[in-house]
Image (tube, rainbow, N blue to C red):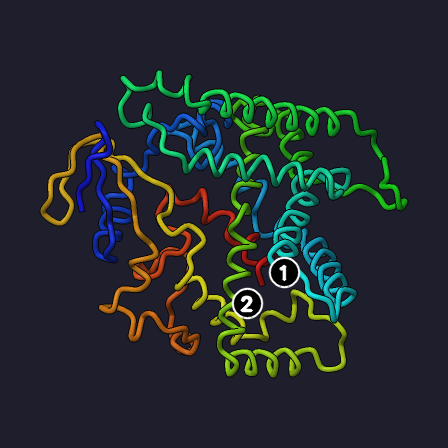
């Protein structure tokens, strides 16, 4: 479907074949991100991974993140944090019983607590800081979803000076910058051998690792402070509303389907045995849990329209002319409900994945909850960390 959003031509992709053509066969041509006022202002001229223009800068930052920050060994090393925070959440729910609880808030706090400890360290895991970050990211998401005339009709940029949009964006950018500056300054001032308030040693977090790369010049790429702040911004943005929303939808579907809940309970009891808690090592023995989550992600992908792409040259897609600068929006939500690929697509049926090789890693274009291709690394390279938290 072709739309004109002001001066910007936009193509909406809602089929697996078209998604494969764009994200695989012509991946390089469609690897750019369109410029947008909000991330440009808040993320230091879009120096991060998610919103950066396709090119050498994006490749270098992505390489640092994939190879040094979130490689498999690093992700596994944070397992104790995920287990501790999950245990704290379970205890919180247990203490609240039999009173009513807001499970949505608890799941948001779980995701935030994990990412605070992994990315920023112990000092920033207290409730006040988490709430401050929640409000800032909520404002970012709201502004990003607000129609900005200047992004589509450059001659109407002046409107933002009168509708308070510019003022809100500038204020938010200042708040984020002050927060990240405080984080980096605190990390730089840490003394060797410093301990937490409980006497345990401080584990290196993602900010520590980035500062070490910067200090020891471990990369051929010059990592400035703005890039460090941009990368950490993405670490939080990747989990904002994604992990907690995915968990919330999964629990909702389980509650709607008592038979699924019973199967899951039996699987958990069988794996747990006499143990009081499940550990990450136990997850490999729980295949039904994994297909439940796969089915939940099919019906409720965390990013239903993914992040928009932009054509870097004139091309043809399935016989149609696509001009340079055309914005491409991939409707992952519609693709995952296409009756050509899914029997009874509106039904929640985890069993459909039991004997299926379809996975969420972007190789099966009828199922792309996290996107596919080199550009979707902005979501996919967070995948192991996000899913370990989600599980």
Placement of 355 over or under 116, stated as above or below: below
Assess whether mark 1 and mark 2 are in contact (beta carbons under 8 angstroms): yes
Q: How many marks?
A: 2
Q: Is residue 270 left or right of residue 64?
A: right
Nearer to us in this view, 345 or 370: 345
Residue 269: give x, y in percent of width and height: 66, 81
Question: In terms of secondary structure, where does tag 1 sit?
Answer: helix
Placement of 205 over or under 24, stated as above or below: above
Residue 64: give x, y in percent of width and height: 53, 36
Q: Which mark is residue 228?
A: none
Question: In terms of secondary structure, where does tag 2 sit?
Answer: helix
Label 2 or label 1, whichever lies nearer to me, is 1
The residue labelled by disc 1 is 103
Label 1, residues with CA under 10 Å away: few <14, some 14-19, many ≥20? few
The residue labelled by disc 2 is 251
Q: Is residue 103 left or right of residue 376?
A: right
Quarter of the image for the C terminus: give it.
Answer: bottom right
Q: Residue at x 51, y 83 (%)?
A: 259
């Amino acid at each position: 479907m072709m739309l004109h959003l002001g001066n910007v031509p936009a193509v909406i992709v809602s089929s697996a074949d078209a998604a494969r053509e764009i994200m695989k066969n012509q991946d390089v041509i469609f690897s750019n991100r369109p410029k947008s006022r909000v991330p440009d202002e808040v993320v230091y001229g879009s120096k991060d991974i998610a919103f950066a223009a396709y090119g050498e800068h994006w490749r270098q930052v992505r390489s640092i993140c994939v190879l040094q920050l979130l490689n498999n060994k690093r992700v596994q090393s944070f397992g104790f944090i995920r287990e501790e925070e999950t245990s704290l959440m379970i205890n919180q729910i247990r203490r609240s019983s039999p009173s009513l609880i807001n499970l949505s808030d608890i799941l948001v706090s779980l995701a935030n607590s994990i990412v605070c400890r992994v990315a920023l360290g112990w000092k920033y895991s207290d409730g006040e800081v988490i709430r401050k970050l929640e409000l800032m990211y909520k404002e970012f998401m709201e502004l990003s979803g607000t129609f900005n005339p200047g992004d589509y009709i450059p001659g109407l940029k002046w409107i933002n000076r009168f509708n308070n949009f510019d003022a809100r964006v500038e204020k938010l950018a200042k708040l984020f910058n002050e927060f990240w500056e405080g984080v980096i300054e605190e990390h730089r001032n840490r003394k060797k051998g410093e301990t937490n308030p409980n006497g345990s040693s401080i584990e290196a977090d993602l900010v520590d690792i980035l500062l070490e790369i910067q200090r020891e010049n471990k990369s051929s790429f010059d990592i400035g402070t703005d890039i460090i702040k941009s990368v950490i911004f993405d670490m939080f943005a990747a989990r904002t509303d994604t992990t907690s929303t995915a968990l919330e939808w999964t629990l909702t579907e389980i509650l709607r389907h008592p038979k699924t809940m019973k199967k899951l309970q039996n699987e958990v009891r069988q794996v747990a045995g006499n143990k009081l808690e499940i550990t990450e090592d136990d997850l490999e023995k729980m295949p039904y849990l994994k297909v439940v989550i796969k089915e939940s992600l099919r019906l409720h992908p965390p990013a239903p329209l993914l992040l928009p792409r932009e054509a870097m040259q004139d091309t043809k897609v399935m016989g149609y002319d696509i001009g340079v600068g055309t914005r491409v929006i991939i409707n992952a939500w519609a693709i995952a409900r296409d009756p050509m690929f899914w029997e009874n697509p509106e039904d929640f049926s985890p069993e459909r994945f039991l004997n299926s090789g379809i996975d969420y890693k972007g190789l099966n274009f009828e199922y792309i909850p996290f996107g596919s291709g080199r550009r979707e690394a902005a979501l996919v390279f967070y995948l192991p960390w996000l899913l370990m938290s989600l599980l």
